[in-house]
Amino acid sequence: MKKYISILIVFLIVSCSDKKEFQGFWYGKFEYDETQFPVLMKFEKGSYIDYYSVPYDTLKYEIDGNNVTAYYYHPYTDELMNEYNFQLSSFGDSLSLYYPASDTKITLYKTSESNFVLDYLGDKNLNINLPKGNRKEMVLGRDFRFHRPLYLTYQNDNLVANYYDTTVIVDNEFYKFLLKQREKEAEKDWFSIPVTIISDKNVKISDIKLLKEQLSLIGLRRINYILHSAEYNKVKTLSSYIPFSEKEYEKARSLGLKLPPPPPPRVELDSNFVRKHSLLFEIKGQSILYNDTVIQEIELKKIIQEKAILDSKLEILFYLHETVVLQDYIDFVIPIYNSFYELRDQYLSEKYNDLSYYSEEKRDEAKRKYQLILGELNQKEFKKIKYNL
């Protein structure tokens, strides 16, 4: 049903007063049954890419007045697979696209920002400076789905979130606002689809924890942080998972929310186990401390990789001071992720001697060989381990 998006092309071209061929990126929103989805299109001569259609491919189009016909050809045989018909209209700087077959509407806008994730932000009063990190860029739609975008920053000294074009203060009752969105989504999708967090890099980590607590109270545990990317149609991301906790479970029960009981904690805090199998780090502002000594990224990776090669039970424990902001956290975590990716690639290369392709089974084997276990500690836990209390 997402094929209706192809209608976007028409609007773009019709809206140009000089009637020249429309070129470049346009972004927008598709609305259906009170649910919104992102739209991103790139137009070239007589063809366009709909980044969120299935399949992800290039379509050709023709325009006749306010009617647009788009054609999808098989990428290998050139056989015509589908034909789509749309109606268009323009309103000032925006375009409205209507797909009669499903009674759906798309609104399209010209790009103004350098990145789609910022253009998609409806409330332009929010200023967000994305964090940076050494991650692989992924193409929107094809490699990364822009699900549940949640913009996070400060406004008038308040932590605020823009979620589906509504900006509200994030506090201890933010979960109630999120629950209203749940009424619009299918039950089967609620727990499986991640939240995409587009946060300013200077948001305090304590405020990130508040947001994560509110998400987890209603069962939203999969999150993706968006990082800065130099290309409009690409993103860099850091995937994360909000762990279960007994404290969260009890709080949810007190609020009348239903959550499954938490499993036993994965991070073992027994002093003997920690001394043998754990690495303990302390993040204080922009500094990463190991054994009370500030270390750089290259040293961090070396410490982790040397320990991981020798110890299959390795757990990486860390404590974040109140001075830490999101960028500091990312600067610490990404080198850890990259350390394990490098070890897994090295393992596969040495065992199978094939750099071009590894099956899912082989990649799972490498993940089991070098399993990444991260455990964030609170202040009490950190002191207990550090000082053998």
Image (spheres, grey):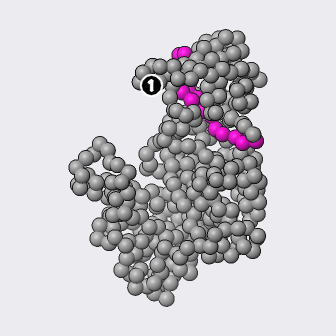
Front-lying residue, 94 or 302: 94
- What percent of the width, then of the height, locates residue 11? 68, 21
Q: Left or right? Give the position of 381 relative to 10.
A: left
Query: Magenta region, mostly helix, strand or loop?
Result: strand
Could you tell me the amino acid type at mark 1?
Answer: Pro
Q: Left or right? Give the position of 208 relative to 328.
A: right
Residue 65 position (above or below residue 214): above
Q: For the image shown, how many numbered marks are present on the structure?
A: 1
Q: Badge 1, how many Cα within 10 Å: few under 14, some, many 20+?
A: few
Question: Which residue carries the number 1 mark?
Answer: 75
Which residue is painted at 51% across and 54% down in the image? Answer: 239
Which residue is painted at 65% across and 24% down in the image? Answer: 7
**Residues drawn in magenta:** 34-50
Quarter of the image that includes the N terminus: top right
Which residue is painted at 51% across and 78% down in the image? Answer: 382
Front-lying residue, 328 or 7: 7
Q: Left or right? Give the position of 44 relative to 311.
A: right
- What percent of the width, then of the height, locates residue 333? 46, 60
Quarter assignment of residue 342: bottom left
Front-lying residue, 234 or 66: 66
Q: Secondary structure at mark 1?
A: loop
User: Is residue 13 visible in the rendered structure shown here?
Assistant: no
User: Is residue 58 visible in the rendered structure shown here?
Assistant: yes
Which residue is painted at 68% across and 29% down in the image? Answer: 108
Residue 20 position (above or below residue 100): above
